[in-house]
Image: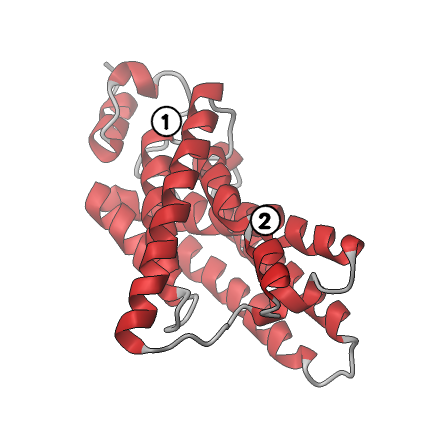
Amino acid sequence: MSKVSSNYSRESGKTPAASSKRPAPNKVSRPGWIEIVVSLVVLAIVGFGIGSQLGRFELDLVFYGLVFTALSGIAGIAGFAAAALVRIRCLSAFGVHRVSGRWMLIGVGAGLVAFVLKSLAILTYIQITGDSANVQGMYAEGGSGGVLSLVLATVLLGLVTPVGEELLFRGVITNALLRYGPFIGVVGSTLIFALMHGFNNVFPAALVVGLVTAEVYRRSGSVWPAVVVHAVVNLPTIPVMVLAGTG
């Protein structure tokens, strides 16, 4: 067994046979704290910075909602791109590489489980705190302008957002923290992911989704099964809110 394979097996919990199927990032090639900081700073600038300024313009409410929804994915992609350009400049080191169809199917199944668990987590949070404020109402506004806006908003939140957030939070942050072991990698990145969603009724949902996607990423070594998990959870969000009139 090579030295690189040994390092990867200890960090990720994979067997040597599993690690030989794809590039094996070690402590040198993994993203580190510099990538974590850069990605989160860019995420804050693009997502929170630009988002906070949108209210200054007299935009149509549907258009405003669509732009706001788009930012949730674009900010993650921007943060990931900045982190990838800082030092390593190798996408496979961030878990961006092909994975087996089996892992993609596992992602679908894990996404369905995460959807049920996150729904229960939100209901429990509301029962305990009484906080039922719809902090994602602006996403529903983006989908409330007819069939076209509904489809566009659903694609943005259900596909673009999972890609952006998984590239950043799993490809960069979980990946970087896994050098300290599975517990720190999975739980640490989950807490960061949840905190970035704020202390509201989305927080418990983010904890559930973060734990599931981080563990799927750790075991598969690729961001794409984690993207599938996240997409399965997110896709029903806007259609359900629009039908319920919660926008």
Q: Quadrant of residue 204?
A: bottom left
- Single out the residue that lies furthest toward the front: 244
Q: CB under 8 Å between callouts 2 and 1? A: no
Q: Circle 1 is placed at which residue position?
A: 24
Which x, y percent locates residue 131?
A: 37, 77
**Mark 2 residue crowding within 10 angstroms, few (<14) / some (14–19) / many (20+):** many
Q: Is residue 146 above or below residue 163?
A: below
Left or right: residue 199 compared with residue 179: right
The residue positioned 24% from the left and 29% from the top of the image is 7
Residue 158, label in figure = 2
Of residues 225 and 149, the one nearer the viewer is 149
Q: Is residue 102 above or below residue 112?
A: above
Left or right: residue 144 compared with residue 204: right
Which x, y percent locates residue 63?
A: 76, 68
Q: Is residue 108 in sight in this rendering? A: yes
Q: Is residue 73 above or below residue 224?
A: below
Report the amino acid beneath label 2.
Gly
The residue positioned 26% from the left and 17% from the top of the image is 16
Earlier sequence position, callout 2 versus callout 1: 1
Of residues 12 and 113, the one nearer the viewer is 113
Report the amino acid beneath label 1.
Ala
Q: Is residue 243 above or below residue 210?
A: below
